[in-house]
Image: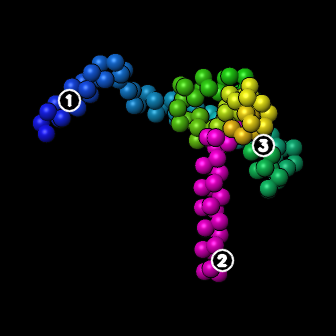
Amino acid sequence: MTGQGNVNRNYLRYVNRFDPPTKHFQTCGRAFLVGGFICSIGQFFRFMLEFAGLTGDELAGTVSVLLIFLGTLLTGLGVYDRIGKNAGAGSIVPITGFANSVASPAIEFKTEGLVYGMAAKMFLVAGPILVFGVSAGAAVGLVYWLIGL
């Protein structure tokens, strides 16, 4: 038994020699700044569209569509991947990250054809998010319906 523990420790020491140290505070700071900047862009869109006369659901839907379009455009141009490499979760959490998770596989597999490549693999990353999101929404709706809210 002690031989196995020594092997594990030796392996971890070996791996740690090649693995750069993680800079947690720097990474969290960049994620915070980039995520906040993306949200500020969304807020800017909201202010401009409110000024143009949109309200309620139309306003919220239009801002979401604009952010999804922006995330998809930046993914297609190869910019969003560079942002994500430096920002981490700051670029994944907003709705632009969801757009990136749909557009990236579509771009990657477009050489395999329109149906079997792009269309079939488009939701490779985002598919589980959609399935569990819809399932959770349906479950919550059922609970609200059952208790009469």
- Give the mark nearest the N terminus, 2 or 3: 3
- Give the mark nearest the N terminus, 3 or 1: 1
Q: Which residues are magenta?
A: 122-149
Residue 33, horizontal then vertical, whole percent: 55, 32
Q: Is residue 93 left or right of residue 119?
A: left
Residue 88, horizontal then vertical, whole percent: 52, 32
Which numbered marker is on residue 7?
A: 1
Compared to residue 41, the image places residue 11 above or below, namely above
Compared to residue 97, the image places residue 57 above or below, namely below
Q: Amino acid at mark 2?
A: Trp
Check disc 2 and report the residue beneath it. 145
Q: Residue at x 55, y 25 (%)?
A: 85
Indicate the colouring scheme: rainbow
Q: Residue at x 13, y 39 (%)?
A: 1
Q: Amino acid at mark 1?
A: Val
Q: Amino acid at mark 3?
A: Val
Check disc 3 and report the residue beneath it. 65
